[in-house]
């Protein structure tokens, strides 16, 4: 995953190691975007056991990462 990736980033993982690796990379990309904006935090949303999105969000204070589970 490149640091210039567009947000939100969608992740679908087939195993735990892959999920953790992809989430770490996506959060790093989102952090770069959040630092550039300087007013949004990072929101990681779990849609089901294998599907996530990572994005920056006005509802999350700058400097924080929050997790949300939709299921």
Image: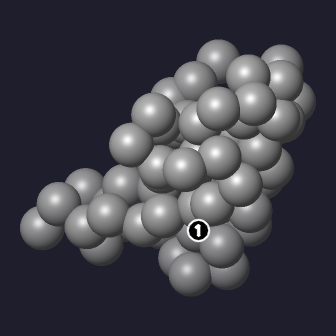
Image spot of residue 52 (x, y percent): 41, 53
Q: In which quarter of the image is the C terminus?
A: bottom left
- Residue extending furthest bottom? 16
Give 60 or 55, whichever is nearer the viewer. Answer: 60
Q: Can residue 26 be seen in this view?
A: no
Quadrant assignment, res 17:
bottom right
- The answer to which of 50 and 38 lies nearer the viewer is 38
Direction left: furthest residue: 71
- In the image, residue 53 sits, relative to residue 6, either above or below, namely below
- Residue 15: x and y, percent? 53, 76
Residue at the spot 42% in from the left edge and 66% down from the top edge = 67
On the image, the x and y values in percent for residue 47 come to 25, 56
Disc 1 crowd rating (10 Å Cα; few below 14, some 14-19, many 20+) is some
- Which residue, given by chain and number where applicable, does mark 1 sit on? 19
The quarter of the picture where the N terminus appears is top right
At a point 39% along the width and 43% down the height, the residue shown is: 59
Occupied quadrant, residue 48: bottom left
Q: Residue at point 58% right, 24% down?
A: 7
- Residue 15 vertical placement versus 41 (above, below): below
Residue 62 in view, yes or no: yes
> Vertical placement of 31 versus 18: above or below?
above
Q: Nearer the viewer, residue 4 or 15?
A: 4
Q: In this view, does 53 lie to the left or right of 35?
A: left
The picture quadrant where one finds residue 22 is bottom right
* Percent of width and height locating residue 12: 45, 52
Q: How many labels does the image show?
A: 1
């Amino acid at each position: 995953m490149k640091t210039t990736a567009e947000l939100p980033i969608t992740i679908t993982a087939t195993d735990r190691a892959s999920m953790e690796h992809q989430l770490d990379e996506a959060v790093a990309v989102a952090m770069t975007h959040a630092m550039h904006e300087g007013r949004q935090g990072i929101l990681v949303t779990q849609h089901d056991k294998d599907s996530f999105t990572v994005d920056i969000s006005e509802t999350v204070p700058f400097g924080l990462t929050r997790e949300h589970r939709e299921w």
